[in-house]
Every structure is written in structure tokens, then in C-alpha cells.
Image (tube, rainbow, N blue to C red):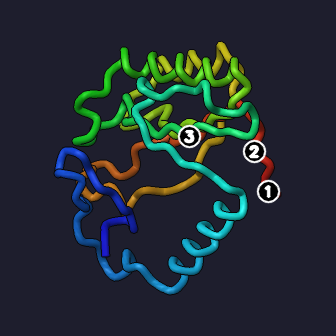
Amino acid sequence: YSFNNQIRFAGNKGWKFNIPFGANRSSFNGAMRKNLEGFVKAIQRKNCKFYSEDFSQFEIDGLIGRDSMVYADPPYLVSQATYNNEWNETKENELLSFLDNCDKNGIRFALSNVLENKGKTNEILKKWISENGYNVYHLEKSYANSYYHRKNKETVTDEVLITNYTINDNA
């Protein structure tokens, strides 16, 4: 059981599981098991390799063009969470430069982020998207019951997936 079905082990806690207890809807059930097993089988068939490293330490030299993909899910610059404490505009710009470098080297990338949150807009991200013509997919998902600390549950959060390739809905 965990909040929003998340699985996370954090370095600041000695790499121990650190998600609070969730409600019954957050339990690991038969449907989740089936989806997870299907995912594992698919990545095994494709001979995928996963790396989990700080982007500033990651060397893209070993990646093979369009057969590789970098997924980045940084702390969101315009949101507030405990894991955002050390994320700032400098790190945001460094990550975007890293992704530009991936693009220049023919490596696909996907970036999860938010363009707007609680009345704040990530102008750095908007400008970067505009200057580079990357694809933006607005994730149509309501988090009304997830933000249990939020007083105004009606505020807009524009969560996006940004890619340097087109996502095929039939894939």
C-alpha cells in the first residue's frame, strides 16, 4: 500500500521506501500485477537497458541515436514539494541544454514537467519549447483529490510531456 500507487526509494532516507501509506485504492492488486508483468515482458523482448543517473553526470556518447531514449522527470520549477528544494533556474537551464544536446545527437527524449501551477508559469520552459519547436502533449488529468494540502483545488496545473519526436497514439 502506498499513496497514489507510487514506489519510491529515496537517497535522503538511506535508499529506503519513503511513500506514506495509501488507502485501499492504492493497493497492489491483480490488475496492477498484470500491467507490471506485461511491461516487464515487453522491455525484456526489446532488450532494454535502464540507467538512473543525474543528467549532469550522464554521458550520452554510448547511446545509439534513435534506438535510444532519454526520459527526464525533474523537480518542477514552479511547484513546491520537498524534493524541489535544490532545483532552481540554473539547474532547469542545464537540463534543457542537456536535452538539446541529446536532440543534436539524434537521441530521442521525453521530458515530464508543468508549464503552469498555482498561478505560476514556467517561462524558461515555455521559451525553450518555442525556440526549439519541440512537441508538447498536455496531460488531461485531474489531480483534485491528490492535492490534499491544496486549499484551492480548482487552480490549474498544466502538466505536459515534451518530446523531440512525435508520439504515435497507435503505438
Residue position marked by numbered label 3 in the rendering: 71
Q: Amino acid at mark 1?
A: Ala
Residue at 36% x, 62% y is 7
Q: Is residue 148 above or below residue 80?
A: below
The answer to which image quadrant residue 45 occupies is bottom right
The answer to which image quadrant residue 90 occupies is top left
Q: Give me the C-alpha separation between circle 2 and circle 3.
A: 14 Å
Q: Residue furthest front?
A: 62
Residue position marked by numbered label 2 in the rendering: 167
In screen coordinates, is 111 left or right of 143?
A: right
In terms of secondary structure, where does tag 3 sit? strand
In terms of secondary structure, where does tag 2 sit? loop
Q: Residues within 10 Å of mark 1 (few under 14, many from 20)?
A: few
In terms of secondary structure, where does tag 1 sit? loop
Q: Residues within 10 Å of mark 3 (few under 14, many from 20)?
A: some
List x then y, in percent, for residue 133.
71, 21
Q: Residue furthest left?
A: 13
Q: Nearer the viewer, mark 2 or mark 3?
A: 3
Residue position marked by numbered label 1 in the rendering: 171
Q: Quadrant of the N terminus?
A: bottom left
Q: Amino acid at mark 2?
A: Ile
List x then y, in percent, for residue 63.
64, 33
**Residues at marks 1 and 2 touching, judged by CB atoms closer than 8 Å:** yes
